[in-house]
Amino acid sequence: MFSVRRAAVNFTQKRAFSASAANPYKVAVLGASGGIGQPLSLLLKLSPKVTELALYDVRGAPGVAADISHVNTHSVVKGYTPAPENLAEAVKDAEIVLIPAGVPRKPGMSRDDLFNTNASIVRDLADATAKANPNAKLLIIANPVNSTVPICAEVYKRRNVYNPKTLFGVTTLDVVRASRFISELKNTNPANEKVTVVGGHSGVTIVPLLSQSNHPEISGEQRDALVHRIQFGGDEVVKAKDGAGSATLSMALAGYRMAESLLRAKAGEEGVIEPTFVDSPLFKDQGVDFFASNVELGPEGVKKIHGVGDINAYEKELIEACLKDLKKNIEKGVEFVKSNP
Ligand code: NAD
Ligand code: LMR
């Protein structure tokens, strides 16, 4: 029943019908056994666009793959045990590689406190992907995103395969939260609430542009409280989980949304726009090489980076505070790869 291969364990039997020839996309999840990895992999199993799902982790990926492979959608699921050749096979030919591998926060920690552990995890997984499949779209979930994305860029540059169009820091959770929080405040349907969030993915680097939302009238203390809640939404979850980690389920949904949007754009859909932290021209003149804003996605990845648009004086101040921190976070990631090649 199970076909055991040299590097992978294939838990899905061959079906009588052929997998969707129109969108034959392989997606790899590195860190697939974790709090985010498992529900993210489950959601990807439900996607009709995904025909092969490669699950890699330093522990437990074959078990997660076996479990998910019983879901009755057409994709093939393979679990990979930790070994360089297995990692290479997991990412090979993938259209998208998602990296949620790394430790999460505990109460009292900042995302930057994760740097010492997660920087080398992300560096090594990015390096393996740069070697085995440099053209994959690389989606970085592991924190601190403001630093792990520049780490990946440096790793790819070192291997002479850097393409800024295919590297994405996943900041989707910030807009997912923002639309939910604003709908709670206004008693509206969150599906109809779109809040642009720009900057980075931690504390004051998260900048919601409420003036561009459906509710530009929100002001004063109510505005300050809402902005603070969007900036520090992650802390709410970390506190509530009380040492058991950070957001996993809402993050899985957000990561899935980003991956699915990229697959839709790859399949030729026009006008697919997601917020994401990318190599961006918007604030390079101020020494900030990466910035999250709305990005139109295309078959090659980044198609068009949107500017921040019209913002008010309050939002200008938020962006100034953001840029100060973001610059340091980015420099820290770049410096890490230079001193730890
Ligand atoms: P977790 O500890 O539950 O899972 C992490 C998984 O990574 C584990 O299964 C672990 O075995 C695996 N792992 C560790 N080192 C690895 C390696 N070298 N190769 C492959 N797998 C490896 O953590 P989690 O809750 O899933 O969070 C993962 C990361 O995502 C954290 O850094 C967290 O801060 C971040 N996160 C980001 C966002 C975002 O919006 N971008 C949201 C939530 C969490
Ligand atoms: C989040 O925003 O929920 C994540 O970045 C995890 C965290 O540490 O808060």
Image (cartoon, helix red, strand yellow):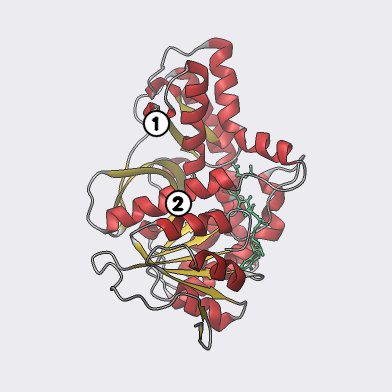
Q: Position of residue 97 (x, y in %)?
A: 46, 64
Q: Amino acid at mark 2?
A: Tyr
Which residue: 60% across, 45% down?
328
As drawn, 70 above or below 172: below
- Circle number at residue 22: none
Is residue 132 visible in the rendered image? The answer is yes
Please give the residue where the numbered disc 2 appears in the rendered image. 256
Q: Is residue 188 left or right of residue 120?
A: left
Give the quadrant of the C terminus.
Answer: bottom right
**Measured Cα–Cα span from mark 2 to mark 1:** 17 Å
Q: Is residue 47 left or right of residue 141?
A: left
Q: Secondary structure at mark 2?
A: helix
Please give the residue where the numbered disc 1 appears in the rendered image. 191
Q: Position of residue 139 (x, y in %)?
A: 47, 57
Is residue 278 visible in the rendered image? The answer is no
Q: Amino acid at mark 1?
A: Ala
